[in-house]
């Protein structure tokens, strides 16, 4: 009798561990499917855009909290839907590339049909929520979704190196979405922030393309270093970063501290890019460029929020 009780206990414990592991696996699969880090990186500029619209229009954040929630949740769901559809469509590429072989679309842990429906449903629910904000916010959200799903994912990515430029449009609309949910996008601040994201995405993506050169080549994805080589790619990275230099000077409305810090970041970023023209180890340099680029954008947008807090600059 006691032996049976011990056996049952062991079975229940095994089932508990198995269920716990399955839960962790599902969470990891969903995190990969929704490209969680990318999702967060896009949500920050949306929040910043809304926050800055509140600041410059003299509106009350508390009074517009409902609009904010609809905007941040709705736009995030739309972006999540676009990213999931991208995963669904790119399963052939992801099967070849080492860094994406663990995605549920490749492993089969989530059926492709289910992935597609998840993407469509998330997009639809997101757009429904956005419709309770403003028409302009919906339009910018649609531009971001459409450009990422159709011209980028389904057309240019496999054909042209310009896929990076096209894809950059999707990220660039994020501060415009947040601002447009509260006020017309006629102010210089959201326009310059959108331009910063658009330009920044080029060297950021090129850094990834250099690091994953062999994988992109094997998958036949038309990334710039794969098609035209490392030297041209590194030169273009320096040129794009140089284009960032004048942009902070259009943002003096955010305060002198913001302009100075942003300029220092730009100069340091450009110096690192120029050093790449002389390095022998492209991979090591590209890793540094990637890390700097990720932190660069986050610092810019967090700083824009901080200096406009009641106790900020």
Image (spheres, rainbow, N blue to C red):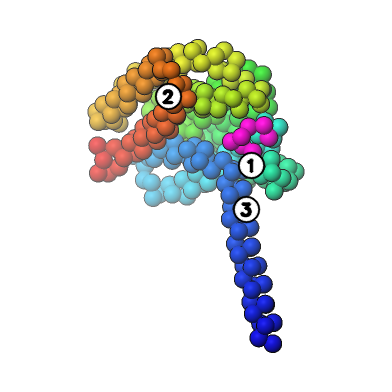
At horizontal 53% and vertical 43% (from top left) the residue drawn is 36
As helix, strand or loop, the secondary structure at mark 3 comes to: helix
Question: Based on the displayed image, in which of its 4 quarters is residue 288 positioned?
Answer: top left
Position of residue 42 measured from the top left corner of the image (x, y, whole percent): 49, 37
Position of residue 259 measured from the top left corner of the image (x, y, whole percent): 28, 26
As helix, strand or loop, the secondary structure at mark 2 comes to: helix
Is residue 39 rendered magenta in the image? Answer: no
State the residue position of label 1.
Answer: 103
At horizontal 63% and vertical 17% (from top left) the residue drawn is 160
In this orientation, does residue 220 appear?
A: yes
Which residues, given as a range, are shown in magenta? 95-101
Mark 3: few, some, or many residues within 10 Å (few <14, many ≥20)? some
State the residue position of label 2.
Answer: 285
Tell which circle, 1 or 2, labels the residue nearer the N-terminal end.
1
Give the Cα separation between the discs numbered 1 and 2: 27 Å
Position of residue 224 measured from the top left corner of the image (x, y, whole percent): 56, 17
State the residue position of label 3.
Answer: 26
Tell which circle, 3 or 2, labels the residue nearer the N-terminal end.
3
Foreground residue among 49 and 290: 290
Mark 2: few, some, or many residues within 10 Å (few <14, many ≥20)? some
At horizontal 47% and vertical 38% (from top left) the residue drawn is 41
Left or right side of 211 for 302: left
């Amino acid at each position: 009798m006691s032996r049976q009780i011990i056996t049952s206990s062991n079975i229940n414990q095994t089932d508990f561990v198995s269920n716990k592991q399955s839960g962790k696996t599902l969470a990891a699969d969903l995190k990969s499917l929704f490209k969680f880090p990318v999702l967060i990186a896009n949500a920050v500029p949306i929040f910043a855009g809304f926050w800055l619209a509140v600041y410059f229009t003299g509106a009350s954040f508390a009074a517009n909290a409902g609009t904010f929630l609809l905007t941040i949740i709705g736009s995030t769901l739309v972006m999540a839907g676009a990213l999931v559809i991208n995963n669904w469509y790119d399963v052939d590429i992801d099967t070849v590339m080492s860094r994406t072989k663990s995605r549920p679309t490749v492993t089969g842990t989530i059926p492709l049909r289910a992935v597609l429906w998840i993407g469509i449903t998330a997009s639809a629910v997101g757009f429904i929520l956005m419709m309770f904000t403003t028409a302009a916010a919906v339009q910018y959200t649609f531009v971001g979704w459409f450009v990422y799903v159709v011209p980028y994912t389904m057309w240019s990515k496999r054909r042209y190196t310009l896929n990076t430029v096209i894809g950059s449009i999707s990220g660039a609309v994020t501060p415009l979405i947040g601002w447009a949910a509260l006020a017309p996008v006629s102010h210089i601040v959201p326009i310059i922030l959108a331009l910063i994201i658009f330009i920044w995405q080029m060297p950021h993506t090129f850094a990834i393309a250099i690091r994953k050169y062999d994988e992109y080549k094997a998958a036949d994805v038309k990334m710039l270093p794969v098609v035209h080589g490392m030297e041209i790619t590194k030169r273009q990275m320096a040129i794009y970063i140089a284009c960032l230099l004048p942009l902070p000077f259009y943002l003096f409305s955010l305060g002198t501290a913001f302009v100075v810090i942003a300029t220092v970041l730009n100069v340091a970023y450009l110096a690192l890019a120029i050093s790449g023209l002389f390095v022998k180890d492209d991979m090591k340099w590209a890793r540094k460029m990637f890390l700097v680029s990720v932190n660069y954008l986050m610092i810019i947008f967090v700083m824009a929020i901080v200096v406009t807090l009641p106790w900020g600059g």
